[in-house]
């Protein structure tokens, strides 16, 4: 006895939904494991309008001035110091060099990275 066409369609949709749920569950688990570092790194980079390679001494000075290190940098190998830095502080570092804001060799070669956040959007100004 064969299945009614609508029953076969429902079975196929249920299989697809279960498959999507399994993939989604795996992705959520990975966010808290070592492989989740790429999700966390992309999340940090998504908040930045620009990225800059800075020297180690400038990095130490920025941390002393209150810039907070992003934890995702310590999860990479080799470890990186990733900071969000206000534009005025960054402009005082003459040795800074711009980086492309994407996952690539240029970004991974830098050991000390300063990121500048996008300016906050003020909807009241419209």
Image: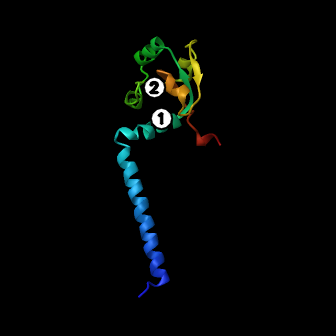
Residue 17 spot, x, y in % from top left: 43, 65
Residue at image x 36%, y 38%? 34
Label 1 sits on residue: 44
Residue 43, above or below 96 = below
Q: Are marks 2 and 1 in contact (CB under 8 Å)?
A: yes
Earlier in the chain: of badge 2 and badge 1, it is: 1
User: Where is residue 40, by image quadrant?
Assistant: top left
Closest to the observer, 1 or 25: 1
Q: Position of residue 41 (x, y in %)?
A: 46, 35
Q: At which x and y percent is residue 7?
A: 45, 80
Q: Quadrant of residue 19?
A: bottom left
User: Which disc number belongs to residue 53?
Assistant: none
Name the residue: 38% across, 43% down: 31
Q: Residue drawn 56% across and 16% down?
A: 96
Considering the image in quadrants, where does the C terminus appear?
top right
Neighbour tally class for label 1: few under 14, some 14-19, many 20 plus, Cα within 10 Å? some
What colouring method underlies this structural image?
A: rainbow
Q: Position of residue 89 (x, y in %)?
A: 53, 18
Up-down relation of residue 7 to residue 16 (above or below):
below
Asked if residue 85 can be seen in this view, the reply is: no
Say which residue appears at 58% left-offset and 18% top-offset: 97
SS type, badge 1:
helix
- In the image, 40 versus 11, the foreground residue is 11
Q: Give the residue at the far bottom of this rendering.
A: 1
Circle 2 packing at 10 Å, graded few (<14), some (14-19), many (20+), is: many
Label 2 SS: strand
Q: As rendered, which of 123 and 92 lies closer to the eye?
A: 92
Task: Left or right? Give the position of 116 relative to 25.
Answer: right
Residue ID for mark 2: 82
Mark 2 vs mark 1, CA separation in Å:
9 Å
């Amino acid at each position: 006895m064969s299945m009614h066409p609508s029953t076969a369609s429902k079975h196929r949709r249920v299989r697809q939904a279960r498959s999507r749920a399994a993939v989604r569950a795996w992705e959520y688990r990975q966010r808290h494991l070592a492989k989740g570092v790429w999700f966390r790194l992309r999340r940090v980079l998504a908040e930045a309008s620009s990225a800059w390679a800075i020297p180690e001494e400038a990095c130490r000075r920025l941390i002393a001035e209150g810039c907070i290190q992003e934890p995702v940098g310590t999860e990479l190998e080799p470890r990186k110091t990733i900071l969000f830095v206000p534009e005025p502080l960054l402009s005082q570092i003459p040795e800074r060099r711009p980086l492309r804001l994407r996952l690539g060799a240029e970004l991974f070669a830098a050991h000390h990275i300063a990121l500048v956040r996008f300016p906050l959007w003020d909807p009241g100004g419209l």
